[in-house]
Image (spheres, rainbow, N blue to C red):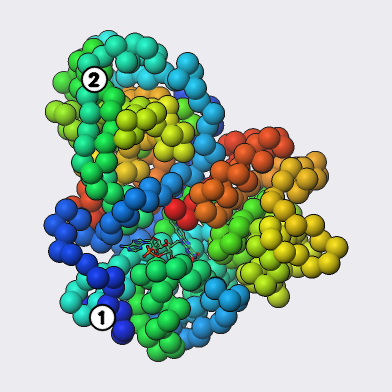
Amino acid sequence: MTEALSSPAFAPVTRFAVPGRIAVSNRTAAVWQTATLTEVRRETPYVSTFRFAVPAWQGHLPGQHLMLRLTAEDGYTAQRHYSIASPPEDSGHIELTLDHVEGGEVSGWFHTVAEPGDQVEVRGPLSGFFAWPGDRPALLVGAGSGVVPLMSMVRHHRARGLSVPLRLLVSARGPEELIYARELGAETTPVFTRSAPDGVPVGRMSTAHVAPLLADQPEGGWEAYVCGSNAFAEHASRLLVEAGQPVDRIRIERFG
Amino acid sequence: MNVTRGFTGRPRVNNTGLPPGQYDAGDDWPVLSAEVTPDLSPADWTFRVDGLVEQPHTWDWDEAHALPASAYEGDIHCVTSWSKFGVRFAGVSLDAFLAVARPHGSATHAVAYSHTGYTTNLPLADLTGGQAWIVWEYDGKPLPAEHGGPARLLVPHLYFWKSAKWVAGLTLLDHDEPGFWEQNGYHARGNPWEEQRYSGD
Ligand SMILES: Cc1cc2nc3c(=O)[nH]c(=O)nc-3n(C[C@H](O)[C@H](O)[C@H](O)COP(=O)(O)OP(=O)(O)OC[C@H]3O[C@@H](n4cnc5c(N)ncnc54)[C@H](O)[C@@H]3O)c2cc1C
C-alpha cells in the first residue's frame, strides 16, 4: 500500500518545490488487475459513476488515480487515467466517475456499452502527489469531473469523522450538471457559470469565492488541491496565488 | 488477453510510429503539470550545469541563444498515453552546454530541475549525442508558458515528464537519484518503447 515519504532526495536551489505526500508501491502500480463492473449510477446527464469489484485492491489514498485499459478482439488496447472517486474505506471496491466525452474512445464505451458484469483492467493506485491522507486542512477547488478526486477526500473526511478543516469550492455549468449534488454539504460552495437557482449569482469562479476562504485560514494554513481541465486549473491556481495562497502549498491535477 | 466486451476502439491505421499503449492526440497538446504555471520572463530565466563537471556554468537567456542553434522535428510521447507526431522545437543541443561544463568521467546521471522546483532524473547517456535539447520555440513561435516556456528541456526519446518544463539546471551525479514523479511512483528511465511507465514496469 502506501507509506510516508521521507524528505526528497534532491533539493534544487529554486523557489517553489512541492513535495509528494506519499510513496507509491512499485508492485501494485505495475500489476494489471481485473475489475468487474457491479453498478452504474447516473450523476448528471453527461456523467455517470461506475462501481467495480476489485477483490485484490491494495487500497489507495483520496486523490490518487489509476490507469484503466480496454482491449479489443484484435488485441488493440486503449488506456486512460481516471481519478478514484470512492474513499479508501470502501474496501474491495472502487468507483470511477466519467464524463461522456464527445467522440471519446474509452468514455464512449463506458457510457454506451458497459453494463454490470463487464470486466476491464486497472492498475494502481498511482501518484503520491495529489494524495490527501487526511492530515492537513484542505482547500479543494474543482470544476466538472475535476471534483472526482476531491470527492474521495470529502467522503474520507466523513467516513472517518475527521475534524481537520476541509472546504470544497466546485464549479459547474448549472445545478443539473453539478456532480454528486445530493452528497455535497456544508463544506461545499458551488459556483455556477451558466445557470443557477433563484438568488444565486451566475459567473466564473472569482476572487470573491476564494478570498473569504483564504482570509479564514485554519491553523497551519490550507493545503490547496486544484483539479479539472487545464484551462480551469490555470484560472483557479492563479486566483489562489493572487489571494495569497503560497505556490508551494498548491497541488494541481490536470485532466489534459 | 482480456478482451473487453463490445469494445472495438476507434478505426485505426497500423501506425508503427506509436509506442505500445499510446494513442495519437492529433492536434491536441494536453497540458500536464502538478504546479502553478510560473510567471517567468526570458530576462529571469537562467540555465546552470553543475555537479560532477570541470567547469560549472550558468547561462542567461542571451548567452544560451549565442550557442549554435539546433532543432528537433519528430514525435513526443506522454505517460498519460497520448503521443504527438511531427512536432517542431528549436533551441540548442544539450551537447553544446555540456561541452562548456565538461562532465567528469565519473558522472553517470543527472537531475534536471526547474525554476518551479520540479526535478527529474536521467542517465547522462540519454542526454548526450544529439538526443536532448534546451528549447524555446515550438512550431516557429515562442514556447507557451503552460508548455514550459520560456525554455524547457526536451528529451523526446523518453516519456515527456523527463522533459522538464521551465528548466533551470542540470546537476551531474555519479549515481541515480529519483526526481519528483519518480518519487511518486513513476519509472526511473521512462522509455516509451519499453512501456516504462511506473516503477516496477
Ligand atoms: C490524472 C488524470 C485523471 C483523470 N480523471 C478523470 C476522471 O476522474 N473522470 C473523467 O471523466 N476523466 C478523467 N480524466 C480524463 C481521461 O483520462 C480521458 O482523457 C477522458 O475520459 C477522455 O478519454 P476518451 O477515450 O473517452 O476520449 P479520447 O478518445 O481520448 O478523445 C478525447 C477527445 O479527443 C477527440 N479525439 C481524439 N482522437 C480522435 C480521433 N482520432 N478522431 C476524432 N476525435 C478524436 C475526441 O473527440 C475527444 O473530444 C483524467 C485524466 C488524467 C490525466
Front residue of this view, candidates A183 and B170: A183
Along the polypeptide, which appears first: circle 2 or circle 1? 1
The secondary structure type at the circle numbered 2 is strand
Residue position marked by numbered label 1 in the rendering? B3
Q: Amino acid at mark 2?
A: Ala
- Determine whether, in the image, residue B163 is placed left or right of residue A153: left
- Determine whether, in the image, residue A189 is placed left or right of residue A85: right
List x then y, in percent, for residue B33. 46, 44
Residue B74 placement: quadrant? top left
Residue B3 visible from this viewpoint: yes
Q: Residue furthest bottom?
A: A117
List x then y, in percent, for residue A71. 27, 75
Q: CA distance from mark 2 to mark 1?
A: 49 Å
Q: Is mark 2 within 8 Å of ligand 1?
A: no
Residue A217 visible from this viewpoint: no
Image point (54%, 68%), residue name: A85
Output the chain of dot 2.
Answer: B
Output the chain of dot 1.
Answer: B
Residue position marked by numbered label 2 in the rendering? B69
- Determine whether, in the image, residue B47 is placed left or right of residue B92: right
Residue B158 placement: quadrant? top left
Front residue of this view, candidates B32 and A232: A232
Characterize the local packing of mark 1: few (<14), some (14-19) or many (20 or more) Cα atoms within 10 angstroms: some
Q: Is residue A144 above or below residue A50?
A: above
Q: Is mark 1 within 8 Å of ligand 1?
A: no
Judged from the image, the quadrant occupied by ligand 1 is: bottom left
Characterize the local packing of mark 2: few (<14), some (14-19) or many (20 or more) Cα atoms within 10 angstroms: few
